Image (spheres, rainbow, N blue to C red):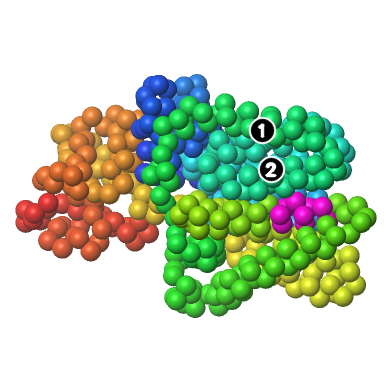
Amino acid sequence: MVLAANIYRAATQSFTSDEARTFNDFVRRPAGEALAVYDANNHVLNTLLARISAAVLGVSKFTLRLPSLAGGALYLAAVWVLSRRLFGNSWRSLVAVSTLALNPYILDFLSAARGYGMALALLLWALEFLSRYQETLERKHLNFAALALALALASNLTLAFPGTALAALAAAQLMARREFRTALDDFLLPGLLAAFLLLVLPLRNAAASNFYVGLASLRDSYQGLIVSSIYHSTRLLPEAAGQASLLRFWLYRTTLALAPVVALAAAAAIGILLSRRKMPAPHERFVILCGGAWLGSLALLVAAHRFFGVPYPEGRTGLYLIPLFCLTAFALLAWAQTGKWTARTLAPLGLLYFGLCAFDFARSWNTSFYLEWPFDARTEDVLRWIEERHAAQPRPLRLSVAGPTVLTLEFYRHIRPLDWLTVVNRGVKPEPADFYLLPPGEAAGYQVLWRDDLARVVLATAASAPGP
């Protein structure tokens, strides 16, 4: 059902400015030109697959979103496999799957033509392959894990932190067991080689100035992820949380307090498990693997910020922190079920909390907009409205618009017969036009023809020749 909803969204929701920019700069242009300049908007693997999809199936918003849909399918499969690894075939597994699969903020990136969802999927599959190796000692699983991490990095460079943390942890575990050649030949070298081959050309012109998006505080970083997940459907700020739902307000406050508690619990659990002489059980090994990857990511983020001035993740650039946090918490809950006291108290409370999260995510179901690009939620409807007017009175028309929506409109002009429409960038060259796409606050003096409260835009015409 979730995959079907992702397909529906890819087919129906308006294209967005970031998707359009990827198409304009990296998919539409010849490969040589696209690789000549680096930009963080270029999610290399997603761009490559989008080029192939467009070449084979033609250019449309759906074909450009096919790679993301494939990544979404891989993510959902990984969530299912990992949840069953922790809880088997039980209702607890259903809670874990629902929490990870229904998070509305993550769902946005399982259909939009960006590389975030694919990167998440490959990271989770790397976790699964490393877990399989620990169980079977079959080296092919190390090869698969190395390839998955390299492809995750190629899907989105934000995976450098969790990818490095997970790779370092896995290599350290191998070396602690004196599997030096295995660590080098079957894991580190294949992964580094694959990452190099995929990224050497796109990154050869990269500079530090390309990585500027972020926040100054780690707390602000994870607080933003919590708000985007819990208040996705309402788009309310934390101070207005109580107006939306008492449950959402409780989830927001609880999650905000729970994140550092889970981090400390994971650190303590890893310390206890590593200090034991006996071999950890499968779910205990997953605590070490997933918890170590999550805590390692946080440690690398802090170090990069403190010593190199790298900003903390903002919004989607820290998307990987959500499933790593959830899976670490689920691994701790699975471990808690092995103790008498913890099985009676901590495990039920934790699963109740995540069950409420899943319930709230389910009622936040959305197939009409992407949270990061609400201003583009109705861009296709705007064009459809103008097309109807043009059909009634065929003549050249001019549409004045400012902001990133200009990129989206140019994309639609490319894939549809809209030669009669000229898009005027009001922010660059203010000129009179037949129609104006404006924020509601700038509509004074215009005659409003169409309004949308979700995208917070109005389509207007000049009523008394106001200044553009």
The answer to whether residue 400 is seen in the rendering is no
Distance between the Cα atoms at labels 1 and 2? 9 Å
Disc 1 secondary structure class:
helix
Between discs 1 and 2, the one toward the N terminus: 2
- Left or right: 379, with 333 as reference point: left
The one nearer the camera, 340 or 51, is 340
Q: Give the x, y percent position of residue 404.
A: 31, 47
Whether pointer 1 and pointer 2 mark residues with C-beta atoms closer than 8 Å, the reply is yes
Which residue lies under the disc numbered 1?
A: 191
Q: What residue type is labelled 2?
A: Ala
Which residue lies under the disc numbered 2?
A: 167
Disc 2 secondary structure class:
helix
Region of the chain picked out in magenta, as a range: 283-292
The one nearer the camera, 41 or 466, is 41
- Left or right: 220, with 293 as reference point: left
> Label 2 crowding class (10 Å Cα cut-off): few <14, some 14-19, many 20+?
many
